[in-house]
Amino acid sequence: MTTFLETRNLTKCYQGQTVLDDVSMTLDEGEVKGIMGPSGAGKSTLIRCLNGLVPIDSGEIYLGEKRLGDKHTNMDKVRSRIGFVFQDFNLYTHLNVRRNVTIALRKVQHMKKADAEAIAQQELARVGLQDKLEAYPAELSGGQQQRVSIARALAMKPQLMLFDEPTSALDPESVGGVLRVMRELVQEGMTMIIVSHEMAFIQAVADDIVFMVDGRVLEEGTSEQIFEQPKNQRTREFIRGLATEAAGAPAEQDA
C-alpha cells in the first residue's frame, strides 16, 4: 500500500504541559485508523495537528511527499484534501443547510453557484438529508447536524477524513445515523482517522488502532490484537472499562 500520511516524533506543549510526546505513526491509502485513549491522552490535539489547525512544536508531518509546515507547502491546498468532522458540528447557525454545505465550495474553490448546489444536494442525499436543504441548524437534531457537517466535508472531495469524537455530543437516539454514514464511507474505501469511544464501531471498522495515554502512543496494532489480546496492562484496563460502559448503555437508534 501507498503511505498517505506519516508523522515523525511529534511534540506539542500547552503552557508547559506536554500533550503530544514523540508521536510517530503512518496511515496508508484506504486505511481506517482508530485512535483511542482516556480523556487528556492527546487524541484530539493529534488529529488537529494533522491538518494544521494546531501547530506542532517539533517533529514532522508528511502528506504524501509534502511536509506540512514547509515554506513551499500551500496549507490551503493541504486542508482542501482533508475533511474534518468536529464533535460540536461547527455549523454556521445563521445559514441554512444548503449554504452551510456550499459556502466552502463557493469561497475556497470559487465554484459556480449552480455547481456548488448540485454537489450539496448530492452529498446531503448521501447522508439522508436531501429534504433538509432549507432547514437551519437549530431546526435539526444533533445527529442531523452532524450528518450535515459530514456532507459539508465530503462536498470538498477530500482524500482523507478526520473524525474527532463525532458522536460524543449526541443523544443515544442520534448516534446510529452518524455511524451508519461513517460505515458507508469505510465501505467506499475512504482513508480515515477516527477518534472515538464507540468501541463496537471502532472494533468493526478500524484496520489499525492507536492507543494513547498522556500524549504518547502506548500500544498500536490490529483491531483484533488491541481488543482481544492487548499487550499493555493500561490498554487492557481501558478496554474493560469501555466494555462495562457499553454494556450499560441504551441501544443505538438511527436519527
Image (cartoon, helix red, strand yellow):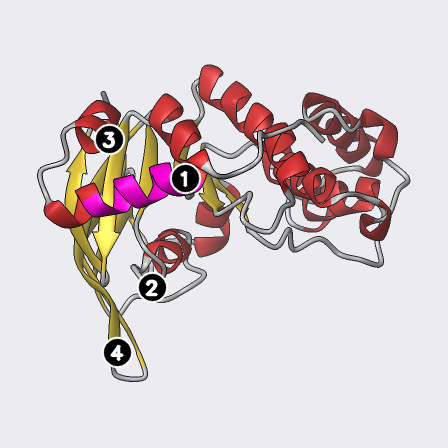
Across and down, in percent, residue 131 comes to: 87, 27
Q: Is residue 124 above or below residue 172?
A: above
Q: Which residue is label 2 attached to?
A: 40
- Judged from this view, the residue extending furthest toward the right is 134
Q: Is residue 179 visible?
A: yes
Q: Earlier in the sequence, mark 2 or mark 1?
A: 2
SS label for mark 1:
strand
Q: Residue at x 22, y 38 (%)?
A: 26
Q: Residues within 10 Å of mark 1 (few under 14, many from 20)?
A: many
- Give the CA separation, mark 4 to mark 2: 11 Å
Q: CA distance from mark 2 to mark 1?
A: 16 Å
Q: Main secondary structure of the magenta part?
A: helix
Which one is earlier in the sequence, the residue at label 2 or at label 3? 2
Q: Does 67 appear above or below 21? A: above
For disc 3, the marked residue is 227
Which residues are the magenta region?
237-245
Q: Earlier in the sequence, mark 1 or mark 3?
A: 1
Q: Amino acid at mark 1?
A: Ile
Instruction: Give the quarter of the image for residue 171.
Output: top right
Residue identifier under label 4:
17
Residue at (65%, 55%) from the top-left corner? 90
Horizontal relation, residue 115 to residue 67: left or right: right
Name which residue type carries label 3.
Phe
Query: Closer to the N terminus: mark 4 or mark 1?
Result: 4
